[in-house]
Image (cartoon, rainbow, N blue to C red):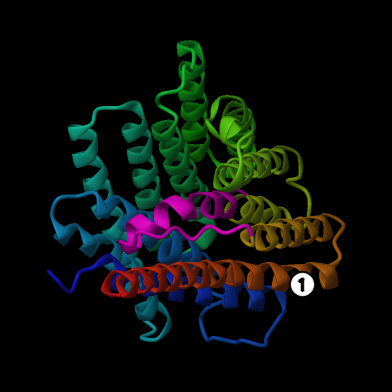
Amino acid sequence: MKVLQPIYLFPLVIASLILGIAGGWIRLGYLEYNVTGSAANHGLLMVGGFLGTLISLERAMVMKHKAWLLVPMLSGMSIPVLLFLGKPVLGNGLLFSASVGLIAIMYLQSVRHQEIYQFIMSVGAISWMLGNFMILYTDFIASAVPWWVGFILFTIVGERLELSKFLPTPKIAKNALIWLLALFFLGMWTPFHGIGNWLMGTSVIFISFWLLHYDMAKIASKKENQFKYIGIGLRVGYVWLTLHGIILCFMENHPLYYDLFVHTFFLGFTFSMIWAHAPIILPMVLNIKHNPYHPILWIGWAVFQISLLGRVLSSIVFNPDLRLWFGVINGWTILLMFGLMVIIIIHKIKRDYSLKRKSSVQEFV
């Protein structure tokens, strides 16, 4: 099982991201990087190939046996099967198998640690599986989207509860969050164009308010350096979650309704979570001691947020040209952020090597 190392699987995560962004650009009308099949499989690339593989990799890392890394490998390998072999049923089957594997991981972790946040993340894994099943059953991406939203929402809320477990949160507040998540779960089972979007939208608005008030990001945002970066990043993500809920509830008749509620969640909320968690998660996933934080990340973070806001506003006023260019800038900024993190890590490794070498020379002299 030495071949199954997290660092060897991470290129599948990045490849899915790059191909997913290229597919998103094509859907916007930007054809500079036209990868066959990437536009049609944009959702599968971003949610299954990128987010699914990344989350599965993170959860498999804490398992005792390395064989569990087969789970993120399955979701990662679905991408070349979908795009380059042209076998959608097999590719979707790999994603479905990966989601079943993630459920198994979460079940074992929940048995070992019977905490509410483990059960919430398990519901997230189940939601991913149900979304992937809908793709196999209907061959219609939109039918999976509410379940994919649930996958990310339950996973992130569970992780935030785990990281905030030592805060003195009132029991009534914890119970309120559980009821809100239950309401959201009910909304996923309800026909979307009807009461389903109202149930999901209303619940996520109040979930975002809960996170803004009770999550430890509120404390971290008042500190300095990396803590401030994480705290503010998370809280801005919760604001995006609020906007996502408002769009779900009140903008159903807008011609770009689907685009708006999908991207305020998967770009605004989800990527804000990724940028904030990266200094903590990436060193663990890549098994390195250096974290990819440097104040320069604030620049990329700001450009990402501004360009996404520009895309959303231009969609609301239905300006396709501005929507296109803000979308292209937003995609490049995502790649820039990951590039900056790589450069930061390399710089820190070189710095430590230089200091170690200098120290060795001084001891020799």
In the rendered structure, does residue 288 fall within the stretch colored magenta?
A: yes
Residue visible at 41% across and 36% down in the picture: 158
Give the x, y percent position of residue 44: 46, 66
State the quadrant of the C terminus: bottom left
Residue 2 visible within the image: yes
Query: Which secondary structure dominates the residues rendered in magenta?
Result: helix
In the rendered structure, does residue 66 fall within the stretch colored magenta?
A: no
**Label 1: which residue?**
324
Looking at numbered disc 1 in the image, what kind of residue is underneath it? Answer: Leu
Residue visible at 49% across and 42% down in the picture: 153
Q: Note whether 263 is above or below 207 in the view shown.
A: below
Give the x, y percent position of residue 262: 62, 54
Give the x, y percent position of residue 85: 36, 86
Q: Note whether 164 is above or below 79 in the view shown.
A: above
Counting the numbered discs, the total is: 1
- Camera-side residue of 66 and 297: 297
Task: Determine whether the residue tagged by mark 1 lies in a helix, strand or loop.
Answer: helix
Residue 41 visible within the image: no
Direction from residue 144 to residue 240 in the image, left or right: right
State the quadrant of the N terminus: bottom left
Q: Which span of residues is magenta-colored?
A: 269-295
Give the x, y percent position of residue 117: 36, 31
Residue visible at 15% across and 61% down in the picture: 67
